[in-house]
Image (cartoon, grey):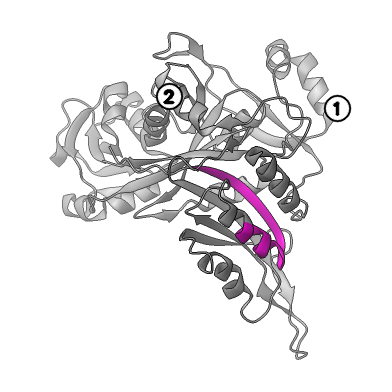
C-alpha cells in the first residue's frame, strides 16, 4: 500500500516537465573496450566513451559498421527517458533491504565511476559495493549513459566536497538524465605526493593533479616551491608521471594510484585540511522503495515563479513540518536562463530563472514528507523527486 501511495505521488509530481527534461535526439555511446582484470575474476570494459547526439539512422549505421558495437547495442536500454512512474519499466524497484543485502551477499555488480584506475571515485565505488566490478569512464556523462543503457548496474559519482564545494556538472546531469539516487557514500580524501622511484622531493620542479586536489594542497605545494599544472583527474596525473618516466614532475593522488602505477610516496596527507570529505551519489535505473526503519534522505529539484517571498514559501513547507534541510543548491535554468524585466524601463532581460536542488532528512514513505511535497507542488512550476535513500554516516 505504501509503495502505491509513493508511486502515485511521484506520478503527480513528475507531471510537469522542465524545458530541459527532454531532448530531440538520441544519445549514443561509442565504447573502446579494454580488458581489465578485477577482483571479481572477470574482465570489464573501460568506457572510454565519446558522447554525442545522433539520429536513429546514424545509430543503425554504426551497428552495421561495427560488429562489436552491435553486440553491445543489443543489451542497451533504447529509451533513455526511464521514468519512476512508468508502467512499462521492466526492472522492479529495489527495496532498501535489497540495497544493503547487495553489499553483503557478494553479488558482483558493475559500478561506473569517472576517472582511471586509482581514482578516489573508484575507492568510493568499492566502499559502496565491496565486491563490485568498478568500471572507469572518461567523463561524468559517460557514467550516466552507461547506467541508462544497461552497460553497468550503478554509477558512483561525486556531488560535493567539504573543501571544494558542489560539483555543478553532476547537478546538471541529474536533471538531464532519468536515473534515480539510491544511496550515498562519504569518502575521506587523503592526498599523497607521488613520484617515480629514485626521485626525491628536492628533484621536483612541478606537480600534476586535478585542480581541486591542487587547491586542497596549496600550502604544502607552496612551501615546496612546486609549479602546479592541472589535469583531468588525480589518478590520470599519476599514470602520466609513471608512463612518461618523468624525473622532475610529481603527482598529487591517492596511495592506491601509487600502488597501481608503481610510484613512490614521497609524502602522505599533504592536504591543508584534514577534514577533506567527498560525498558521492549512487545512481541506478530503478528507484528504491523507501522505508522508515532507518534514517532516510530525499533529494528533489524544483523551479518557482519569480515573486516576493516565493523561495521563502517553498522552504517553509518543510519548516512547518519540522523537516530538516541538509542542502540547497541553485542552478540557472538552461533553456531560459533570463526572465524579461517587468519594471517598464528597458524591457531587457534582468532576472535569472533558477532550479533549486534540495536534500531533506525524511523518507518518502513518511506521510509528513509526502504532504510537504504536495504543498510545494501548489506553487512550484516544476518538481521532481531525484531519490529517497538511506543516509550514510560512516567516514572510514
**What is the crowding at mark 2: few (fewer than 14 residues within 10 Å), some, or many (at least 20)?**
some
- Residue furthest to the bottom in view is 345
Location of residue 158 in the rendering, given as x and y in whole percent from the top left corner: 46, 43
Location of residue 190 in the rendering, given as x and y in whole percent from the top left corner: 26, 41
- In the picture shown, does residue 64 fall above or below 315? above
Residue marked by disc 1: 57
The answer to whether residue 164 of the structure is visible from this angle is yes
Q: Nearer the viewer, residue 56 or 126?
A: 126
Q: Which of 217 and 89 is in front in this view?
A: 89
Q: Quadrant of the image for the N terminus? A: top right
Label 2 – label 1 distance at C-alpha: 41 Å
Q: Nearer the viewer, residue 101 or 311?
A: 101
Mark seen at residue 103: 2
- Residue lying at 60% horizontally and 47% vertically, measured from the top left: 386
Location of residue 231 in the rendering, given as x and y in whole percent from the top left corner: 42, 42
Mark seen at residue 369: none
| Lateral position of residue 203 relative to residue 257, left or right | left
Q: What stretch is highlighted in magenta?
A: 371-389
Location of residue 63 in the rendering, given as x and y in whole percent from the top left corner: 77, 17
Residue 386 is one of the magenta-drawn residues: yes
Residue 322 is one of the magenta-drawn residues: no
| Lateral position of residue 64 relative to residue 233, left or right | right
- In the picture shown, does residue 379 fall above or below 173? below
Instruction: State the SS at label 2.
Output: helix
Instruction: State the SS at label 1.
Output: helix
Amino acid at each position: 500500500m505504501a509503495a502505491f501511495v509513493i508511486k502515485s505521488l511521484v506520478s503527480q509530481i513528475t507531471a510537469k516537465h522542465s524545458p530541459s527534461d527532454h531532448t530531440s535526439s538520441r544519445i549514443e555511446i561509442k565504447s573502446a573496450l579494454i580488458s581489465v582484470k578485477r577482483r571479481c575474476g572477470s574482465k570489464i570494459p573501460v568506457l572510454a566513451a565519446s558522447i554525442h547526439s545522433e539520429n536513429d539512422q546514424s545509430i543503425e549505421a554504426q551497428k552495421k559498421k561495427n560488429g562489436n558495437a552491435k553486440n553491445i547495442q543489443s543489451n542497451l536500454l533504447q529509451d533513455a527517458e526511464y521514468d519512476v512512474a512508468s508502467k512499462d519499466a521492466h526492472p522492479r524497484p529495489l527495496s532498501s533491504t535489497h540495497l544493503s543485502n547487495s553489499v553483503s551477499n557478494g553479488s558482483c555488480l558493475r559500478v561506473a565511476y569517472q576517472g582511471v584506475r586509482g581514482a578516489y571515485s573508484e575507492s568510493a565505488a568499492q566502499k559502496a559495493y565491496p565486491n563490485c566490478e568498478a568500471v572507469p569512464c572518461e567523463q561524468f556523462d559517460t557514467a550516466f549513459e552507461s547506467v541508462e543503457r544497461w552497460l553497468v548496474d550503478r554509477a558512483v559519482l561525486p556531488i560535493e566536497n567539504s573543501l571544494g564545494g558542489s560539483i555543478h556538472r553532476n547537478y546538471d546531469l541529474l536533471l538531464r538524465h532519468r536515473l534515480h539516487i539510491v544511496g550515498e557514500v562519504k569518502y575521506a580524501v587523503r592526498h599523497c605526493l607521488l613520484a617515480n622511484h629514485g626521485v626525491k622531493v628536492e628533484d621536483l620542479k612541478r606537480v600534476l593533479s586535478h585542480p581541486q586536489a591542487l587547491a586542497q594542497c596549496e600550502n604544502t605545494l607552496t612551501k615546496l616551491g612546486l609549479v602546479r599544472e592541472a589535469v583531468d583527474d588525480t589518478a590520470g596525473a599519476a599514470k602520466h608521471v609513471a608512463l612518461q618516466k618523468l624525473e622532475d614532475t610529481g603527482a598529487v593522488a591517492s596511495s592506491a594510484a601509487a600502488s597501481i602505477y608503481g610510484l613512490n610516496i614521497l609524502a602522505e596527507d599533504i592536504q591543508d585540511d584534514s577534514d577533506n570529505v567527498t560525498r558521492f551519489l549512487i545512481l541506478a535505473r530503478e528507484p528504491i522503495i523507501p522505508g522508515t526503519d532507518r534514517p532516510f534522505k530525499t533529494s528533489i529539484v524544483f523551479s518557482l515563479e519569480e515573486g516576493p517571498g516565493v523561495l521563502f514559501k517553498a522552504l517553509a513547507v518543510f519548516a512547518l513540518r519540522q523537516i530538516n534541510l541538509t542542502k540547497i543548491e541553485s542552478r540557472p535554468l538552461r533553456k531560459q536562463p533570463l526572465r524579461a524585466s517587468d519594471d517598464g524601463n528597458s524591457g531587457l532581460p534582468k532576472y535569472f530563472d533558477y532550479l533549486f536542488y534540495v536534500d531533506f532528512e525524511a523518507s518518502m514513505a513518511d506521510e509528513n514528507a509526502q504532504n510537504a511535497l504536495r504543498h510545494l507542488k501548489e506553487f512550484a512550476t516544476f518538481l521532481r523527486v531525484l531519490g529517497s535513500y538511506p543516509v550514510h554516516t560512516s567516514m572510514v
